[in-house]
Image (cartoon, rainbow, N blue to C red):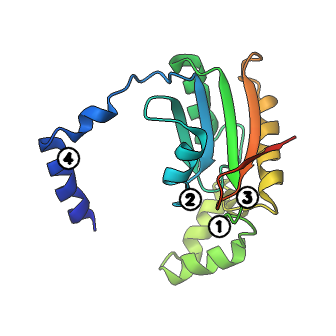
C-alpha cells in the first residue's frame, strides 16, 4: 500500500497538483480543531464546517481526547495559540466512535498476542506510565468532550482570552450538537 501511495505522490508533484493547496502556516480562521482520527471524518468534517486548506489547525487523535494537561495534544494547542495566531478551540467528538468503551484488558491481550511481553508491560508501568489510563476510552462522546474542555479551561498555561467550545458530530449527517 505504501508503494502505491508513493507512486501517486510522485505524479502529484510532477503534475504540480500541489498548487491548489497552497496556504499560509497561520490559520486564516484563527481556529484550532481537536477531533478524532476516525477515517469517516477525513472529508466529512471539513465539508460539514465549510473549511478548506489553510483555514484551521487540525489536531487529531484517538477519540479527540485530552488525556493529561501535559500531553502532546495540549502542547500542539498551546503552540497553535502562542505561535500560530489561534484564538479559539473547537473540540469535536462524534457518534459511533471506536474509542467509546475501550476495554484496557482486551487491548492488553492484543498487545500480548502481538508479541509484547508481560515483562515489557510491567517495566512500562514501573516507569510510571498508567497504561490503563493511557489506553482509556470513554462512556459517551459528550462526557469525553466535556472532560477535554475542562482540562483545557483549567490549564495553568492556557491564556484566559481563548474561547474553548465542544461539540459532538453526527457521523452520518455531519450535524454538530453543542456540549455544555
Q: Are marks 2 and 1 in contact (CB under 8 Å)?
A: yes
Depth check, front residue: 74 or 49: 49
Q: Is residue 157 above or below residue 133?
A: above
Depth check, front residue: 14 or 6: 14
Which residue has dot 1 on it? Answer: 98
Q: Secondary structure at mark 3?
A: helix
Which residue has dot 3 on it? Answer: 133
- Crowdedness of circle 1 by 10 Å Cα count: few (<14), some, many (20+)? some
Give the quarter of the image for residue 20: top left
The numbered mark, 2 or 1, whose residue comes first in the sequence reads 2
Front label number (4 vs 2): 4
Q: How far, Cα to Cα, is label 2 from label 3?
A: 20 Å
Percent of width and height locating residue 177: 78, 47
Q: Residue at x 62, y 81 (%)?
A: 109
The numbered mark, 1 or 4, whose residue comes first in the sequence reads 4
Q: Secondary structure at mark 1?
A: loop
Which residue has dot 2 on it? Answer: 38
Q: Is residue 142 above or below residue 53?
A: below
Q: How far, Cα to Cα, is label 1 from label 4?
A: 32 Å
Which residue has dot 4 on it? Answer: 12
- Crowdedness of circle 3 by 10 Å Cα count: few (<14), some, many (20+)? few
Amino acid at each position: 500500500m505504501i508503494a502505491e501511495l508513493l507512486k501517486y505522490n510522485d505524479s502529484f508533484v510532477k503534475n504540480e497538483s500541489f498548487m491548489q493547496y497552497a496556504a499560509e502556516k497561520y490559520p486564516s480562521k484563527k481556529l484550532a480543531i481537536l477531533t478524532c482520527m476516525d477515517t469517516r471524518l477525513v472529508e466529512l468534517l471539513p465539508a460539514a464546517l465549510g473549511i478548506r486548506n489553510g483555514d484551521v489547525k487540525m489536531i487529531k487523535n484517538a477519540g479527540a481526547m485530552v488525556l493529561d494537561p501535559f500531553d502532546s495534544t495540549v502542547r500542539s494547542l498551546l503552540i497553535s495559540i502562542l505561535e500560530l495566531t489561534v484564538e479559539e478551540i473547537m473540540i469535536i467528538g462524534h457518534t459511533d466512535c471506536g474509542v467509546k468503551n475501550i476495554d484496557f484488558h482486551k487491548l492488553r491481550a492484543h498487545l500480548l498476542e502481538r508479541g509484547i511481553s508481560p515483562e515489557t508491560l510491567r517495566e512500562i508501568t514501573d516507569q510510571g506510565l498508567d497504561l490503563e489510563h493511557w489506553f482509556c476510552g470513554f462512556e459517551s462522546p459528550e462526557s469525553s468532550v466535556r472532560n477535554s474542555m475542562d482540562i483545557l479551561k483549567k490549564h495553568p498555561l492556557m491564556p484566559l482570552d481563548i474561547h474553548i467550545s465542544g461539540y459532538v458530530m453526527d457521523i452520518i449527517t455531519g450535524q454538530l450538537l453543542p456540549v455544555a
